Image (tube, rainbow, N blue to C red):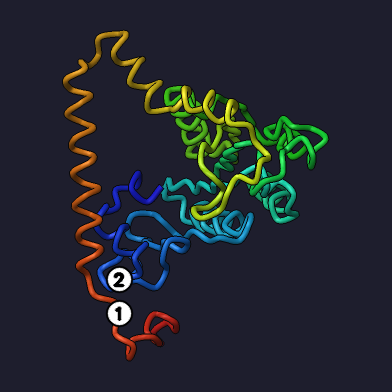
Amino acid sequence: HYLAKGGSMEEMAAEIFCRETGCSRGRGGSMHLIVPEVGMLGSAPIVAGTISLALGAALAAGIRRDGAVAVTFFGDGATGEGVLYESLNFASLRKLPIIFACENNFYATHMPVRECRVNRDIFEIAVPFGIESKQVDGNDVLAVTEAASAAIERARKGGGPSLIEGKTYRTRPHAEGMRDGGYRTAEDIEAWKQRDPIMLLEAHLLDREITTPEQVAQVRQEIEDVVAEGLEFAKSSPYPEPDTAALHIYGKS
């Protein structure tokens, strides 16, 4: 999300490595990217933890009437947290410019959604609050773009919040270093790998002759170069000095 907002690959890699040159000066690491300059108001590892933060940002945008729209991303596991429903209610009540984007990959950490939800169609949780909601193929870039664009336009026109459920999948463990634990089959994972969103978009562009195999290969090489440069930058950057540990904790009076 930080990169999509225009953030620097080098600064993101450095932040993951907790280096002083990182986008949050090494204070956030991999879980707490905060870069207000590009519209990244903060990520957090607490389940559903950023939903109410985005709600506050949307309230501020509504008061300012500056056309800004807040977006909060969360997984299917967050639908078990009460703060989501409180936020849906308040957002609808105040017609706030916010999009609730649920990345439903069916498993949270390891529990299948079928074992913790009676209604597995997550987009329907917004209906009782009078919120426009939609379920899309989360691996279809064009479908996600269409749904998001409509929700953003509606929010900016004063139409209030939206909820978009993208049905997707993670082909790796919940977190690096964790094993899958046998709760998913290898066949299921492999089937979803064939629906990788980048591969699907490439096929779409190639089938319609919008691009060529040579152009696709060039873009892939450019991406690999940017990532390699970011990694090298991170590895060679210094750690924050110990005597700066108290910086960025208190606001300036």
Residue at x 48%, y 39% (from the top left corner): 156
- The amino acid at mark 2 is Arg
Count of marks overlaid on the render: 2
Q: Is residue 209 above or below residue 101?
A: above
Residue 160 visible in the displayed image: no
User: In what element is the residue under mark 2?
Assistant: loop
Residue 35 visible in the displayed image: yes
Q: Quadrant of the C terminus?
A: bottom left
Q: Is residue 226 left or right of residue 132?
A: left
Nearer to me, 83 or 233:
233
Q: Is residue 16 left or right of residue 96?
A: left
> CB atoms at circles 2 and 1 under 8 Å apart?
yes
Nearer to me, 12 or 143:
12
Q: Earlier in the sequence, mark 2 or mark 1?
A: 2
Answer few, some or many: residues within 10 Å of disc 2's Cα (few below 14, many 20 plus, some between 14 and 19). Answer: many
Position in image of residue 6 (x %, y %): 29, 48
- The amino acid at mark 1 is Pro
Residue at x 71%, y 37% (from the top left corner): 126
Nearer to me, 121 or 158:
121
**Residue bearing the label numbered 1:** 240
Residue at x 25%, y 9% (from the top left corner): 209
Q: Is residue 147 above or below residue 46?
A: above
Position in image of residue 31 (x %, y %): 47, 61
**Residue bearing the label numbered 2:** 19
Answer few, some or many: residues within 10 Å of disc 1's Cα (few below 14, many 20 plus, some between 14 and 19). Answer: some
